[in-house]
């Protein structure tokens, strides 16, 4: 039984190599993908143990900040005041 498992593992590993060529190809990265990513770790609200790790580039961080600001501005401009 273990011989069959070993043979199956060898086939699974070697077949994609034979189909794609002699060596497996690594995906090429575009300049955007090579941008430096910075990670922040923050504790989850209401928990002392769970932590959330967020990794983003500076451009992604700036876009998220602008989107948050737009949402806040939209919500604040839609407020309805009663009694005045």
Image (cartoon, rainbow, N blue to C red):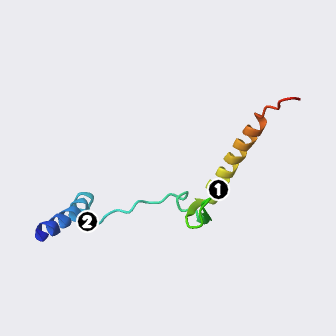
Pick whichever, 32 or 38, lies toward us: 38
Furthest residue in direction top, as rendered: 83
Say which of 10 and 32 sits in front. Answer: 10
Question: Residue 67 appears at what percent x and percent y?
Answer: 67, 46
54 sits left or right of 21 in the view: right
For marks 1 and 2, give the CA distance.
40 Å
Q: Is residue 14 above or below residue 73?
A: below
Instruction: State which quarter of the image contains the C terminus.
Output: top right
Question: At 60% from the left edge and 60% from the top edge, which residue is drawn?
Answer: 44
Residue 73 position (above or below residue 59)? above
Q: Position of residue 43 (x, y in %)?
A: 61, 64
Residue found at x 55% / y 64%: 50
Sequence-first tag of 1 and 2: 2
Q: Secondary structure at mark 1?
A: helix
Left or right for 10, reference 53 = left
Other-residue count near label 2 (Cα within 10 Å), few / some / many at <14 / 14–19 / ≥20:
few
Secondary element at tag 2: loop
Q: Which residue is mark 1?
A: 61
Please name the residue that numbered disc 2 is placed on: 22
Q: Nearer the viewer, residue 36 or 64?
A: 64
Residue at 64% in and 59% down: 58
Based on the displayed image, in which of its 4 quarters is residue 42 positioned?
bottom right
Left or right position of 80 against 52: right
Q: Residues within 10 Å of mark 1 (few under 14, many from 20)?
A: some
Position above or below: 60 against 49: above
| Discs 1/2, front | 1
């Amino acid at each position: 039984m273990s011989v069959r498992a070993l043979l199956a593992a060898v086939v699974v590993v070697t077949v994609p190599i034979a189909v794609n060529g002699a060596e497996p190809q690594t995906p090429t990265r575009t300049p955007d993908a090579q941008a430096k990513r910075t990670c922040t770790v923050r504790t989850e609200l209401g928990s002392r143990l769970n932590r959330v790790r967020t990794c983003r580039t500076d451009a992604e961080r700036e876009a998220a900040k602008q989107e948050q600001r737009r949402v806040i501005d939209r919500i604040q401009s839609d407020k309805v005041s009663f009694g005045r």
